[in-house]
């Protein structure tokens, strides 16, 4: 079966409702996605690092328990694991305070083997951090050349608003490498001062990448392609927390790409009905995580989705080589 490779940071989120903490949940943007991928029964691999401490060991154990390959998670003795405080407001949106060490170069980076049809998810500050950018870019170029689908989630936080000019070249490089770009209207308002999906696409995405998904919370999902823009409504849901909503949209969409056997060559030619099916899976994953305090879909929902795909006859294209997850130690 084709696999999903997530690359990104790990962090322990301590979540507050009102004055008191209510949960401590392992997190990180790509991390949240890859946990949901594993729970949905799709082969999942994570590339990243954490401290070789109590928090780091809990994060690694959590990944293993959720069917994620951790052979490419570096447990470092020279760093402490990152922690964040997430304060939920009356709309269940989170305000964060981060406690982590200053940026540093990746150490002993080992990449997994990548095969045609695999999906690599990357994004957030991790994908543009100048300290680790050369290593991350090298891996993305390797994965692209190996025939993987590269899914880039911008996830550009207001924390970096004043650094947009400095970071924009790396963002545009990621657009160019990606087969599909996703971001929220909030992301693009921060970096470009725009919220309209078509304006964002034609002015900033299309020169680099042909496919763009713009999510706008509870309003709509817009898919922009060279042929057309498709808009899909978002039904009302009961929300407990919006933490991980976008990350899990990514997970559902990516799982659907694999379960419905969609290749990189297929993507520019997808019909309205196919985009609707893919975005609906993303929406359902997102709705599930919003209904709980957790950062990823619940296990029962993941099993139900796997069974639903099976009953619908959605199977991955056979690829014996994609079963191998052996490391490639030639990464510089």
Image: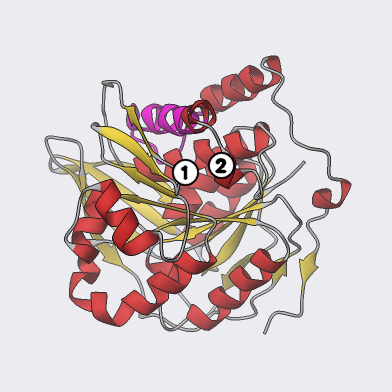
Q: Position of residue 327 (x, y in %)?
A: 77, 67
Question: Is residue 141 placed above or below 11 in the rendered structure?
Answer: below
Residue assigned mark 2: 254
Q: Secondary structure at mark 2?
A: helix
Residue sticking out furthest to the right: 320
Question: Is residue 6 placed above or below 92 in the rendered structure?
Answer: below
Residue assigned mark 1: 250
Q: Position of residue 156 (x, y in %)?
A: 30, 61
Q: Residue at x 88, y 46 (%)?
A: 320
Q: Is residue 305 visible?
A: yes
Q: Position of residue 43 (x, y in %)?
A: 69, 43
Left or right: residue 246 versus residue 161 is right
User: Magenta span: helix, strand or loop, mainly?
Assistant: helix
Residue sticking out furthest to the top: 311
Q: Is residue 80 visible?
A: no
Left or right: residue 43 versus residue 222 is right
Q: Are marks 2 and 1 in contact (CB under 8 Å)?
A: yes
Query: Disc count in the image?
Result: 2
Cα distance in 3D space between marks 2 and 1: 6 Å
Left or right: residue 86 versus residue 138 is left
Q: Is the N terminus in the top left, top right, bottom left or bottom right quadrant?
A: top right
Mark 2, Cα crowd under 10 Å, few <14 / some 14-19 / many 20+, is many
Q: Residue at x 59, y 69 (%)?
A: 140
What span is in magenta? Answer: 278-298
Choose top left, top right, bottom left or bottom right for residue 312.
top right
Question: Residue 228 versus residue 68: which sits nearer the camera?
Answer: 228
Q: Position of residue 38 (x, y in %)?
A: 61, 40
Residue sticking out furthest to the front: 227
Q: Is residue 223 magenta?
A: no
Q: Residue at x 34, y 54 (%)?
A: 201
Q: Residue at x 59, y 48 (%)?
A: 63
Question: Residue 214 versus residue 138: which sits nearer the camera?
Answer: 214
């Amino acid at each position: 079966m084709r696999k999903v490779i997530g690359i990104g940071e790990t962090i322990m989120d301590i979540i507050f409702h009102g004055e008191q903490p209510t949960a401590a949940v392992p997190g990180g943007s790509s991390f949240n996605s890859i946990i949901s991928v594993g729970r949905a029964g799709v082969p999942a691999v994570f590339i990243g690092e954490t401290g070789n401490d109590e928090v780091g060991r809990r994060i690694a154990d959590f990944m293993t328990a959720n069917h994620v390959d951790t052979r490419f998670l570096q447990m470092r003795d020279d760093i402490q694991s990152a922690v964040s405080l997430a304060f939920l407001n009356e709309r269940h949106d989170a305000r964060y305070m981060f406690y982590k060490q200053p940026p540093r170069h990746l150490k002993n980076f080992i990449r997994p083997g990548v095969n045609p049809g695999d999906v690599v998810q990357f994004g957030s500050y991790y994908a543009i951090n100048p300290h680790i950018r050369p290593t991350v870019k090298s891996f993305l170029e390797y994965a692209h050349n190996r025939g993987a689908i590269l899914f880039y989630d911008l996830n550009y936080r207001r924390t970096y608003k004043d650094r947009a000019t400095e970071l924009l070249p790396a963002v545009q490089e990621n657009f160019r490498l990606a087969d599909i770009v996703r971001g929220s209207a909030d992301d693009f308002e921060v970096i470009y001062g725009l919220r309209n999906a078509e304006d964002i696409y034609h002015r900033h995405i299309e020169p680099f990448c042909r496919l763009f998904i713009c999510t706008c919370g509870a309003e709509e999902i817009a898919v922009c392609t060279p042929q057309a823009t498709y808009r899909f409504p978002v039904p009302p849901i009961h929300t407990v927390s919006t933490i991980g909503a976008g990350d899990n949209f990514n997970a559902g969409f990516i799982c659907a790409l694999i379960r419905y056997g969609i290749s990189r060559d297929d993507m520019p030619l997808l019909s309205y009905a196919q985009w609707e099916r893919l975005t609906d899976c993303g929406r359902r994953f997102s709705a599930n995580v919003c209904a709980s305090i957790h950062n990823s879909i619940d296990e029962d929902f993941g099993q139900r989705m796997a069974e639903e795909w099976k009953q619908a006859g959605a199977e991955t294209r056979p690829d014996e080589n994609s079963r191998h997850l052996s490391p490639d130690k030639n990464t510089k």
